[in-house]
Amino acid sequence: MADSSSSSSISNATKRACDACHRRKVKCIGDGAKACKNCTSSGLTCTYNAIPQKKGPKGSRAKVITELRENQRQTQLSSGRNGIEETPHSPAYLRKKGLLSMEMITACVDYFFANMYPTMPILHRVKVGETIGQMEQSPEAYCLVVSLCGYMMIQPNMVLPPTAFQDADIQLQPSLELGQLLILETLRVRKTYDYIESPTVWSVITSFFLFGSYFCLDRQNTAWFHLREATTLSHVLGMQEESHYQTSGDVIESSRKRRLYWLLFVTERAYALQKHKPLSLHATISLPTMEDDPTETVELSGFVHLVNLFRPFDDTFVGLWNKARTGCSTEWLAALQQQLSDALPVYLASTESQAVDLRCSQQWLRTMVWQLSISHGYLSSVASENGMSFKFPIEISRDMITAMSGFSQAAMEVHGIGLIEKLFDVACTLIDVMSCVPHEQYSFEYGPRDYLNQFMTIISSLRGGQQRYLPLLLTKVHDAMPTMPTPGFSMPMAPASSRLLEDLWDSEGNSQGQTHSSSASTPFGSPPLDAIAPHTVPGFRHSFPLGTSGIGYGDVTAPVSMPMYQNQGPPQSMFPTSTPGQEYRGG
């Protein structure tokens, strides 16, 4: 009889919405036997306790989820005082109420999988939904979701719909400002539990998202701290050992952890080249395979290509780059240039946006090897290997412009500032070389000046390029080659009160009286906000770009001087964004 009554109760419950769905006026997706999908994704307790009321006028729908969560929290607190065990370190007690709405979370998750997933294939959509459902009980889950949302909102192309603020207790504001609030919330809640002594894969991903957020905000010391934190936690978990991936019974979790390790591997190496940092991760595990997920063969193929691009930049190269090691040779550098040239096939099995990142990263890395060659005095105007020639950046620029001309504007736009910085860095190196080559040597039909004009056109057309990078590029052209015309472009006359891109992005830093590091941290050959005066190398009748110490230039002979700039720079693209799509077969 009791069983019949229980079955009847469940049957009756399924004929109407659960309490939370009824209160929110949304369709209830459940069978009455377990929590409905809406409650699970919103972190609410699914109940059927309310007594159906007669139809009539209803109140406002705003802030319904917040109200429901608060009511449930108060009920749980009351139960705890009556003898039920409390969990004082759970997010329900610690989180800042009304900071995130479910629509915000959904928008951020959608943005990640639509734009960033191919180059960061470390999350699984179904499991992300399960993690969202655990936010009320698990501080690790809460911090992961909040850091993901913060990182997405800091992306330059991320725009929240105004309706996302209807169920939140905060006022309508730009997604960038809200993203910074979410990062601070992640750090605040993270202090309440010991993720260092007992880390999980969620801990590693959260640290990586914090790195990405501060990287975008140009807070480079903080970014480096969290990247190093992520790599250290991966070591604590044993992710550098192949055996670590054989013990997990969850195939999805195992594959995502393997991809996470390789993403950290690529990111650390790119950052080491950019900021002269040491390495901690090495190629000690197998690469992801196409069998991981037959539905993602295109995305995985592009991801593996990215890993292979950075694999040659090991302790040997980074040690030489950081001047912590000696033993460089012309043969080794030439072989490395050839390896980079052959690294990518003519036809890439990847999404188009992945192809943008791969082609651009390939040419940027070739530029890095060329810079190491010049710093060791191995370049020559009569070198048999193109990669060891002083004019090699002209060839690099040609290849990059050729590749970029085959991509759509949308495929480039999705990468944001990271892509612009790579283009900017290669363009500045081209300017340095052009300033040392007499005009008549490249007066053929299509040459360096045309490549430079193409760089300017692309940079000015991308979001963020017109405001900051084009003025810097024009300044460098004017300083290095005063007589060179720049068709269609003019030197900007910005008022003293104008704000550069990094000022708009680092509003948190400005509010705390902090200054940007961009002016003192610019890439090799790229002009800082206050350019350094030309410097003449002793023993030569020309001026050349120098790194952090004096370097020789072999038997290069050029009749003009080249200004010197410091070998540091604004952040290159460590974690570019991409849009999943059809297999890309372009150049």
Image: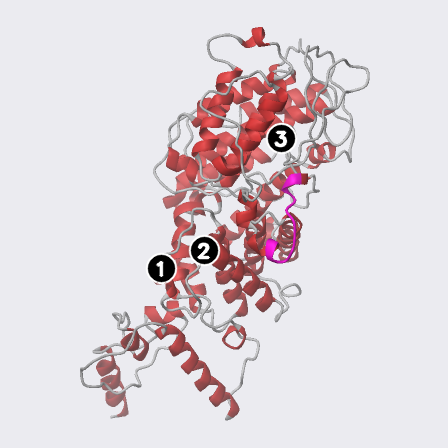
**Amino acid type, residue under disc 3 in the picture:** Ser
What residue range appears in magenta? Answer: 510-519
Dominant secondary structure, magenta? loop
**Amino acid type, residue under disc 2 in the picture:** Ser
**Amino acid type, residue under disc 1 in the picture:** Pro
**Residue 292 lies within the magenta run:** no
- Pick whichever of labels 2 and 3 is earlier in the sequence: 2
Q: Residue shown at 50%/26% (left/top)?
A: 490
Residue 162 image label: 1
In the rendered view, tell whether residue 319 sits above or below residue 195: above
Q: Residues within 10 Å of mark 2 (few under 14, many from 20)?
A: many
In the rendered view, tell whether residue 62 sits above or below residue 520: below
* Closer-to-camera residue (551/269): 551
Position in image of residue 583 (x %, y %): 36, 35
Work out which quarter of the rendered image holds the C terminus and state it.
top left
CA distance for labels 2 and 3: 30 Å
* Closer-to-camera residue (575/463): 463
Q: Which residue is mark 2?
A: 175
Q: Residues within 10 Å of mark 3 (few under 14, many from 20)?
A: many
CA distance for labels 2 and 1: 10 Å
